[in-house]
Image: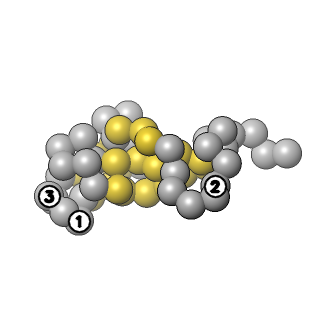
Amino acid sequence: MVEECDTCGRSVSAEEAIRRETFADLDTNRWQTLCCPNCGARLRTIFVGPDS
């Protein structure tokens, strides 16, 4: 997965992205927000936990 940052235009892979806790009421053990390592803008929220 490669995302392009809308703020700074950098292409960011999932490995390069900064992982942060999600906003709102999502379970932080199952969801993380990927952010641009260049400017810190949010790129995408992804599911990372087991499905149960």
In this rendering, would 20 be left or right of 49? left
Q: Which residue is at 51% across, 56% downward?
A: 23
Secondary structure beneath label 2:
loop
**Mark 1: amino acid:** Asp
Q: Which residue is at 34% across, 48% downward?
A: 35
Mark 1 to mark 3: distance in Å? 6 Å
Task: Assess disc 3: are there few (<14), some (14-19) or many (≥20) residues with their C-alpha within 10 Å of its C-alpha.
Answer: few
**Mark 2: amino acid:** Leu
Task: Assess disc 1: are there few (<14), some (14-19) or many (≥20) residues with their C-alpha within 10 Å of its C-alpha.
Answer: few
Secondary structure beneath label 3:
loop
In this rendering, would 5 be left or right of 46? left
Q: Looking at the rendered structure, which numbered label has been put on residue 8?
A: 3
Mark 1 to mark 2: distance in Å? 23 Å
In this rendering, would 4 be left or right of 1? left
**Do tag 1 and tag 2 residues touch (Cβ < 8 Å)?**
no
Q: Nearer the viewer, residue 31 or 3?
A: 31
Q: Which residue is mark 1?
A: 6
Residue that sits furthest to the right in the current view: 52
Q: Which residue is mark 2?
A: 26
**Mark 3: amino acid:** Cys
x and y percent of residue 20 in the render?
A: 44, 42
